[in-house]
Image (tube, coloured by chain):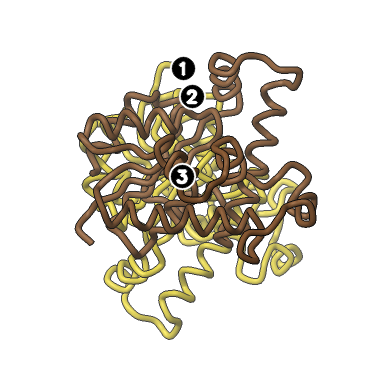
Chain colours: A brown, B yellow
Amino acid sequence: MANRIITISREFGSGGRTVGKMTAEKLGIHCYDNELLEKIAEESGLAKEYIAERGEYTPRGGWLATAFADRSVNGLSVQDYLWTVQRKLILELAEQESCVIVGRCADYILDGKADLLKVFVYASMEKRAERIVKLYGETSETPEKRLKDKDKRRAAYYQFYTDMEWGKAQHYHIAVDSGTLGIDRCVDIIASLY
Amino acid sequence: MANRIITISREFGSGGRTVGKMTAEKLGIHCYDNELLEKIAEESGLAKEYIAERGEYTPRGGWLATAFADRSVNGLSVQDYLWTVQRKLILELAEQESCVIVGRCADYILDGKADLLKVFVYASMEKRAERIVKLYGETSETPEKRLKDKDKRRAAYYQFYTDMEWGKAQHYHIAVDSGTLGIDRCVDIIASLY
């Protein structure tokens, strides 16, 4: 496979998605984030909102909370069905073109199957809190609580499907603190490694 | 404090020490690695070999194995005495000059006390095994076993004195896989961030 794929794993609120988009623009390749969501929605028949939430996070209350509530598709839980569709589409994308893929365990799914640059983007709690309030506004929950909840559920999702610890430097080729280095510098570094 | 300090935390065999030395050369600043060892030896009166081993690693067999065997200095265990000397010297260095400091929990010791760029250098088991055999030769233990032992004891040391998890991306401003990116590229990236 000659395509070169950048996978961006990111902490919620770190600006990793923006880093992915800007890097792709700089390199003249596609960034699959929202577009990937749409492809998954089309292929799976599931709602985009459901996929956005359940394609990267364990449900609030943990897996058990929905184990019996979820309907099944072809004998799989909806969650596992979504995983198989995501996985298939990500593998297809990597066959088709060089691109940036944000999130969705693409680093794990493509490991050993494509020419990968695996990136992790993170930032301090303070910087992320600042960012999510600016982007998504205030809610009744403090930004710290929202971030902790997201972190926990994303890590649990990753662990469940990949059996690896999320956010451990050693899983990635490079890991960058976007809060300290700034988005632009992260983009420059990643693009220079491509 | 106007000095800018780069701390390099590194996995054994990753070439992190070389990355530190080359980055310092490129920036025209000092790299404290062996020189720091010598300073600690002079200040503490302990042997360099002892410091190299016990200033970053828990003893083989864990802390308990030596808790009673170690003599004490001023009422501290030798291990704790060494830690206080290391800590003092690292803080002094940061006051004196901009520099690169390799290992010895300098990232933790200087956090919030200096203008820091905290770097973590790591590589896959295969790449590190290759490197240590080339550098230090074969021994009766497999390189993988030597690396696992070093990793475990370094992580335990770090955890004991800093109460943080060693090698977690979020502790650093940037983390680089020297095995994939190559030493030169790591040096370029770090120097560009300085």
- Residue at the spot x=55%, y=14% of the render? A134
What distance separates the C-alpha of mark 2 from that of mark 3?
52 Å
Q: Position of residue A105 (x, y in %)?
A: 49, 51
Tell us which disc is closer to us: 2 or 3.
3
Residue A4 versus residue A53: which sits nearer the camera? Answer: A53
- Residue at the spot x=33%, y=37% of the render? A31
Local crowd size for mark 1, using a 10 Å CA cut-off: few (<14), some (14–19), many (≥20):
few
| Residue B1 appears in the figure | yes
Amino acid type, label 1: Met
Tell us which disc is closer to us: 3 or 1.
3
| Residue B94 appears in the figure | no
Q: Position of residue B48 (x, y in %)?
A: 46, 56
Image vertical order of residue A139 relative to residue B165, above or below: above
For the residues labelled 2 and 3, say whether their Cβ atoms are less than 8 Å apart: no
Which quarter of the picture shows residue A186? top left
For the residues labelled 3 and 1, say whether their Cβ atoms are less than 8 Å apart: no
Label ID, residue A42: 3
Q: Secondary structure at mark 2?
A: loop
Amino acid type, label 3: Glu
Residue B161 versus residue A183: which sits nearer the camera? Answer: A183
For the residues labelled 2 and 1, say whether their Cβ atoms are less than 8 Å apart: yes
Q: Position of residue A39 (x, y in %)?
A: 42, 44
Chain under numbered label 3 = A
Q: Earlier in the sequence, mark 2 or mark 1?
A: 1
Residue at mark 2: B114
Local crowd size for mark 3, using a 10 Å CA cut-off: few (<14), some (14–19), many (≥20):
few
Amino acid type, label 2: Ala
Residue at mark 1: B1
Chain under numbered label 1 = B
Determine whether, in the image, residue B183 is placed left or right of residue B129.
Answer: left
What distance separates the C-alpha of mark 2 from that of mark 1?
6 Å
Local crowd size for mark 2, using a 10 Å CA cut-off: few (<14), some (14–19), many (≥20):
some
